[in-house]
Amino acid sequence: MKNKEIILKGKGFILRPYRKGDEFSLSEIINNKNVQNLLRSKYKKFTPKEMKKNIKSSCDNLFIIDINGLASGMINIGADKDHSFKADFGYWLSKENWGKGIMTEVIKLATNYYFKKLKLRRIYAYTYPQNKASSRVLIKNGFKLEGILRNNVLKNRKMIDENLFSKIK
Ligand SMILES: CC(C)(COP(=O)(O)OP(=O)(O)OC[C@H]1O[C@@H](n2cnc3c(N)ncnc32)[C@H](O)[C@@H]1OP(=O)(O)O)[C@@H](O)C(=O)NCCC(=O)NCCS
């Protein structure tokens, strides 16, 4: 199901599909160390071209977080390739917009949409234990901590634990 025409409206932002040129602000945001350090991404730095490629290669249910016309972050869900009615998702936002309640509402709108449109029964996400804000936005949206996966991911040449959160229907 493509989200080409889908726009979800929030307070002070909209969730919309990718538009040409978004890659410029998005690559700048993700190259901020404060953002990059909290992501699972393999890349140290994204050029706009790499960002565009990354967006194009992801599934059709990626939303751009648009604040006053500027691409300011994104939320994306993995494809449910094996039709197991479950999928994981990720999200990030420009540093200057943190702490305003935006991602709490983004997750609410997007996960409601994903559960319904993709007929999912389980949505899950990983957070680094030190990323309190990321765990908090999930908890505020009814996600439950299932456990801590020890040494689950290699980040900056170190093995790091991850929290596993899920919400089910
Ligand atoms: C995580 C992130 C998406 C949160 O977005 P946001 O719009 O700032 O989140 P909100 O403002 O909706 O909510 C943040 C919540 O975390 C809380 N919080 C923030 N920093 C915290 C800290 N150090 N300790 C405890 N709670 C914290 C806030 O108080 C708020 O909770 P509250 O409403 O109960 O007070 C954003 O910080 C981000 O993009 N980070 C970098 C990328 C990232 O971490 N992505 C997720 C990877 S798993």
Image: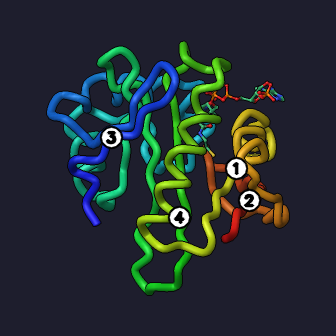
What amino acid type should be assigned to the residue bearing mark 2? Phe
Label 2 or label 4, whichever comes before in sequence order: 4
Q: In the rendered structure, find residue 127 and report the number of the disc placed on it.
A: 1
Quadrant location of ligand 1? top right
Q: Secondary structure at mark 1?
A: strand
Q: Residue at x 71, y 47 (%)?
A: 141
Badge 4 density bin: few <14, some 14–19, many ≥20, Cα 10 Å: some
Q: Does the beta carbon of the residue at mark 1 sit less than 8 Å from ligand 1? A: yes
Question: Which mark identifies residue 7?
Answer: 3
Ranked by sequence position, the earlier of labels 4 and 3 is 3
The residue where tag 4 is placed is 115
Q: Picture coordinates of residue 89 (x, y %)?
A: 53, 56
Figure check: 137 above or below 27: below
Amino acid found under the numbered disc labelled 1: Thr
Could you say which quadrant of the image residue 78 lies in?
bottom left
Residue where numbered disc 2 is placed = 165
Foreground: disc 2 or disc 3? 3
Report the side of 6 relative to 119 (left or right): left
Which mark sits nearer the N-terminus, 3 or 1?
Answer: 3
Circle 4 SS class: helix
Q: CA distance from mark 2 to mark 1?
A: 8 Å
Describe residue 109's horizontal placement relative to residue 70 as left or right: right
* Quarter of the rendering occupied by the N terminus: bottom left
- Gap between marks 2 and 3 measured at Cα: 26 Å
Query: Which of the two discs, 3 and 1, sits closer to the camera?
Result: 3
